[in-house]
Image: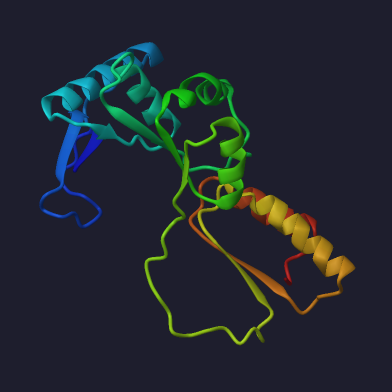
Amino acid sequence: VFILTIYSEEDSFYLLNNEVVKLSIFNKSSSDKFAFKKILNLSQGIRKQIENNNIGLIIPLGTESSIYVFFALFLKRSVKKISWIHYSFFKPLNLKERIFRKFILPSFDKIIILNKTDYFKYSELYPGKIIRIPNPVPFHSEKVSNLKNKNILALGRIDKIKGLDSMIKAFKILLEERKIGEWKLNIFGDDNGEQAHIEKLISENNLGDH
């Protein structure tokens, strides 16, 4: 098993088995300003590592990595490739992501997604190619909630893609229509540029007490 990164890393954040080999394409100081040159250089680097290490299967994570692998293995059918999509099927797509979904993703042997809804949506586009691998839970608790505390917990980075604004609007509807004023919504996570907007939304909807 190899882990291939764009830039070299001295230490891994994760504990790796000693038999896992870390490879990289560039040193940290390297960079490309132009998109086409970046794609070309990365694709050539990926292909070189594949050939040098006799790799038979590669799993790029996300759109950009999958694009690099697509060009690296263009017309090279002997290496199997699996694209790992780590965002919702319903995420608003930019032009690059639309091109990727329509023209590049069909060339992959398999596609890994996260949840059941995405499994069915992607299966409509690419029948027989979809594998669902949910995010793992890194712990097991013996405690089970008694469901008496009227708290809702949202846990994750405070990012636009997470849809916290929609959750807050839905929570307000519940408060008003179901008269559940004793309930509270707790949001925990690192700010990814969305916290000020979320706090403003809470204030505008008079939800500070909830």
Q: Can residue 144 be seen in this view?
A: yes
User: Along the line of sight, which residue is nearer the eye, 200 or 162?
Assistant: 162
User: Along the line of sight, which residue is nearer the eye, 164 or 69?
Assistant: 69
Q: Is residue 120 above or below residue 138?
A: above
Toward which corner of the image does residue 67 lie, by quadrant? top left
User: Along the line of sight, which residue is nearer the eye, 164 or 197?
Assistant: 164
Toward which corner of the image does residue 75 lie, by quadrant? top left
Q: In this view, does 86 lie above or below 209?
A: above
Q: Is residue 22 above or below residue 28?
A: below
Q: Which residue is rendered at x = 50% and y = 23% of the image?
A: 100
Q: Which x, y percent locates residue 82?
A: 37, 35
Q: Which residue is rendered at x = 74% and y = 72% of the image?
A: 209
Q: Which residue is rendered at x = 44% and y = 84% of the image?
A: 142
User: Along the line of sight, which residue is nearer the eye, 160 or 78?
Assistant: 78
Q: Which x, y percent locates residue 6?
A: 26, 31
| Left or right: 201 in relation to 155 | right
Q: Which x, y percent locates residue 85?
A: 46, 39
| Left or right: 171 in relation to 3 | right
Q: Which colour scheme is used?
A: rainbow
Q: Which x, y percent locates residue 45?
A: 22, 21
Q: Which residue is rendered at x = 62% and y = 40% of the image?
A: 121
